[in-house]
Image (spheres, rainbow, N blue to C red):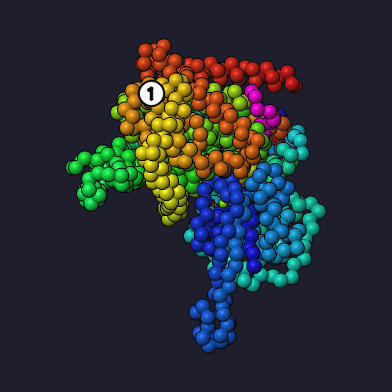
Amino acid sequence: MKVLLVGNPNVGKSAIFTQLTGVNARTSNYPGTTVSYTSGTLTVVRKNPACASCSTIKCKSCHIPDTEKIEVIDVPGIYRLDPECEAEQVACRLMPEGDIYVNVVDATNLERNLNLTLQLLEFKKPVIIALNMWDDTIHKGISIDVDKLSEMLGVPVVTTTGITGAGVDKLIQKILHYPKKVTPKKYKNRWQAIGEIVTSVQSLEHRHHTFLERLQDISVHPLAGIPIAIAIIIALFQVIIVTGEFLVGLMEQLFDRYYTPFILFLSRLLGGGGLWHEILLGDISADKIDYEAAMGVLTTGIFMELGLVFPYILIFYLVLGFLEDLGYLPRIAVLFDRFMHKVGLHGFSIIPMMLALGCNVPGVMAIRNLESRRQRFITATLTAITIPCMAQSAIIFSLTASYGTGHVIAILITIMALWVVLGSFLRLTVKGTTDTLIMEIPPYRLPGFKVLMRNLGTRLYEFLTDAFPYVLGGILFVNILTMLGVMDFLGNLAKPVISGVFGLPSEAVSSYLIGIVRKDASVALLEPLALNGVQMITGVTTLIIYFPCMATFVVLLKELGFKDTAKSMLIMVEVTILTGTWVRLTMLIVHNSPWLYTLVTALFAITVMVVANRKAMQKSSESL
Amino acid sequence: MTLREMKIGDRGIIRIINGGRGVCSKLESLGLREGVQIVKKSAVMGGGPIIVEAGTTQIALGCEIANKIIVGHP
Ligand SMILES: Nc1nc2c(ncn2[C@@H]2O[C@H](COP(=O)(O)OP(=O)(O)O)[C@@H](O)[C@H]2O)c(=O)[nH]1
Ligand SMILES: [Mg+2]
């Protein structure tokens, strides 16, 4: 038996799914988290009511195997059954497969939700309604006559609270005893029918604004909204960097105390040198280990992921998870809508990009929620080219810190300038339309501690299981290739670009090679090259740009298709070379001052944006 | 008057939506259709989106669309 969880976006389907199956589906407080479906199994113990001892997997007295496995599918949120974007199409294709529809309804938004409900009732499938967010109706002064609602719709209605699991047992019972006979309904005037239902089952009570509602109003205040958002974003990044640094320091101590003795022991075991020593431990001396530069699989490999990257991933996802579950992201999308139009997008595109700051893979996946091909192409291309993931950023922070603030800012501004310039260019050249923003803004909800931790846990687990094999394997691979002399060969091959254009030593080729698989490892490989300031900026920026990691590339292929991915890649190569050249030439002109460089680059980007904006305006007024 | 011209904080009733089928059906699925009462909550500065409240739902609309929605007094 297959149960589909169907409902509007952001009504708590994934929360209910997690409660039913124990499988973690990510929740977040904005429409469009679930872009492809997740499935899980609900195992229920079916008791024989006539038997007193029925509770085990196989009852000994009545011999009925009393567990049943039910497949549950968390369908992407839809407002209606005529699909517009990809995510909605996924949902509609799934519909015929279900045996039972559990329609998750946001009880605080009854009227809008019933639109889908009435459409579901037109199918010849049993429908059960989970009236979710039940806890919220109390704060909001909404009361709903559940029995009456059930009677008017002719289907079972259960009240649930997805975050605590209240009411889920009852929902399971209803699923087990679903109505076998279904007569599809037909509504001539759906909205009129909905109006009648809502007026007879729901009553609203007037009450004062809550604190969260006031906060809601301030966050999108006409004047204060944008400055507040900018302040919050800057503050959060400050928090991430400071906390990240602190945690890295802590990790370093832990490594020195507990891991170094083990490595030194291993070193002696391997005889202090030789092939395996070189590959596994790298360049270490008898008493002190420089984990960042040693380049052994078990030294730099392990330390990089656990010591340098993990702390930043942890704090980043803690912050992002909080913002997501609170419901701040859609507000950022609204506030920066106007700005995103400058690169041919609308506000929603900022959400995939913010996710990409953690990891590009979910970022590119989230483009499915965008309506047009043009929007998807621009968002995906900008994301893959200009947005470094947190793993990469973490290594960049720790690597560039010794070069001084000027260099860190220069890298940051180069990437932001590239975002603006490339975006302006794409806006003028990519054909198609960008829709106007139409988006529901969910109410603020204080995220529960348990939910936050569960979401964080899932993300950290994914990071660790994804990262370790690739990073350790990657370093192993580079070490072996170096020993075999393959690196020298490739270095010579790539010399014209890497040394000629970018001005980097030819050994840097290994960075670009590993970057295809893992971006954090690739930046770390620059460490032993002892680069000067200009080389560092060129190296780091081109490593960010030239290729997204393999995992992102695969998702890109899936989301954009072959042709658009190829186009995107072509742009990527061109942009890499142009950026490398820009850094080198500009630095030459400003006599290697990172501050002057930053100024010139920023001014250039602003000029391009203004000119492109004027061009776009002309174009649109001509076409009118 | 259009939704764009309406004052922030005012209440009104949607009279006409001058949009194509796609836009209208999208608005309708969010609960915005002719005859529905709304409150204008905000309009982000610099020609940004307009935020309206219909029932218990808040919806952001780009200002091109807000120009096409005609509202009347309740
Ligand atoms: N107060 C409250 N919040 C809920 C409830 N169910 C889910 N949420 C929250 O509502 C948001 C949306 O939930 P999610 O499961 O991601 O919705 P989906 O888009 O339908 O899958 C998340 O922030 C959840 O933590 C509930 O019953 N009560
Ligand atoms: Mg979901």
Predominant SS along the magenta part? loop
Image coordinates for residue A498, horizontal then vertical, percent: 44, 25
Mark 1 nearby-residue class (10 Å; few <14, some 14–19, many ≥20): some
Q: Chain of mark 1?
A: A
Helix, strand or loop for disc 1: helix
Q: Decide which of A431, A16 is in the foreground and name it.
A: A431
- In the image, is residue A433 part of the stretch drawn in magenta? yes
- In the image, is residue A52 part of the stretch drawn in magenta? no
Residue at screen point 58% across, 23% down = A424
Q: Where B32 sits versus B64, above or below? A: below
Q: Give the residue furthest to the bottom.
A: A61
Q: Decide which of A445, A623 is in the foreground and name it.
A: A623
Image coordinates for residue A405, horizontal then vertical, percent: 33, 25
Q: Amino acid at mark 1?
A: Gln
Image coordinates for residue A20, horizontal then vertical, percent: 54, 63
Residue at screen point 79% across, 51% down = A189
Seen in the image, is A460 located left or right of residue A60?
left
Residue at screen point 57% across, 43% down = A555
Seen in the image, is A4 located left or right of residue B16?
left
Residue A284 in view of the camera: yes
Image coordinates for residue A91, horizontal then vertical, percent: 66, 52
Image quadrant assignment for residue A609? top right
Q: Which residues are magenta?
A: A428-437
- The residue labelled by disc 1 is A535
